[in-house]
Image (cartoon, rainbow, N blue to C red):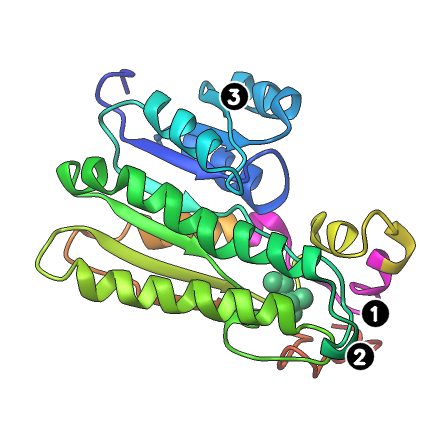
Amino acid sequence: MSGARRKVAVVTGASSGIGAATARALADAGYRVVVGARRVDRLEALAREIGGIALPLDVTDAVSVTEFCNAVPERLHLLVNNAGGAQGLEPVAQAKDEDWAWMYQANVLGLMRVTRALLPRLEAGRGHIVNVTSIAGREVYPGGAGYTAAKHAAVAVTRTLRLELSGTPVRVTDIAPGLVETEFSVVRFKGDSERAAKVYQGLTPLTAEDIADCVVWAVTRPAHVNIDEIVVKPVAQASATVVARGAGL
Ligand code: 8X3
């Protein structure tokens, strides 16, 4: 398809994991993809690979979001708010202000800022907003309060947006993954890859590509179909805390 006629997608947090896999899958599905993240070297390699556009983006920084959104092409059809993450697994009694502040910035304020800036273009393009939240937006677990509270907020923002966009053609989808093996836990445990690996031991976790599949499926339904939410977990995971490790699953 010629560049001019291809639909345009923005994917945030696209330098690795779910974001990068989603950018690849959308490019395969025919989208021209604008990828945003802090790690520009990785982003540029990805953009070269998929014939997309790499733009620096730190969703926790309002100025960076403005610069990013100003550089996004005027024609826009899809926004995938994927940037986010967890920091720490301390109980509330030992909660660290800086971890909580970062989680709210990355998972909630960042999502709001990018969405707010790109909404007029999405409305003009009869677009679609996909927010990658988490089962942590539906459940809680010990040590997870900062992250689960932020993801619950992201889910609330997503649901609110669907109400506010009623009567417009813009679709709003929430993709809520469980255990996906990416850099998520390495970031949560601040570089402790041994501790991070244990999170995925004794089961077959989801891959970033499994989530990208969900995104592509949701956005390729006919224009009158809104997939409100997809909750997706490994077969071995029944809930955030009930995980059948060592069951051969
Ligand atoms: C990640 C899922 O259960 O580790 O979003 O919080 S969980």
Residue 198 part of the magenta segment: yes
- First-in-chain label (3 vs 1): 3
Q: Is residue 234 visible?
A: no
Of the 4 image quadrants, the one containing the C terminus is bottom right
Question: Alpha carbon of mark 2 to alpha carbon of mark 3: how far?
Answer: 39 Å
Q: Is residue 117 left or right of residue 215?
A: left
User: Which residue carries the number 3 mark?
Assistant: 47
Disc assigned to residue 245:
none
User: Which residue carries the number 1 mark?
Assistant: 202
The amino acid at mark 3 is Ala
Question: Alpha carbon of mark 2 to alpha carbon of mark 1: how far?
Answer: 7 Å
- First to last magenta residue range: 196-210
Q: Is residue 223 above or below residue 174?
A: above
- Residue drawn 65% across the image and 25% down it: 42
Does mark 3 have its CB less than 8 Å from ligand 1? no
Does mark 1 have its CB less than 8 Å from ligand 1? no
Within 10 angstroms of label 2, few (less than 14), some, or many (20 or more) residues?
A: few
Q: Is residue 96 left or right of residue 31?
A: right
Disc assigned to residue 247:
2
The amino acid at mark 1 is Gly
Question: Alpha carbon of mark 3 to alpha carbon of mark 1: how far?
Answer: 35 Å
Within 10 angstroms of label 1, few (less than 14), some, or many (20 or more) residues?
A: some
Q: Secondary structure at mark 1?
A: loop
- Residue drawn 34% across the image and 59% down it: 173
Give percent across and percent down for residue 247: 80, 79
The amino acid at mark 2 is Ala
Cβ atoms under marks 2 and 1 closer than 8 Å = yes
Q: Secondary structure at mark 3?
A: helix
Of circles 2 and 1, the one toward us is: 1
Residue 204 part of the magenta segment: yes
Q: Is residue 73 above or below residue 173?
A: above
Of the 4 image quadrants, the one containing the N terminus is top left
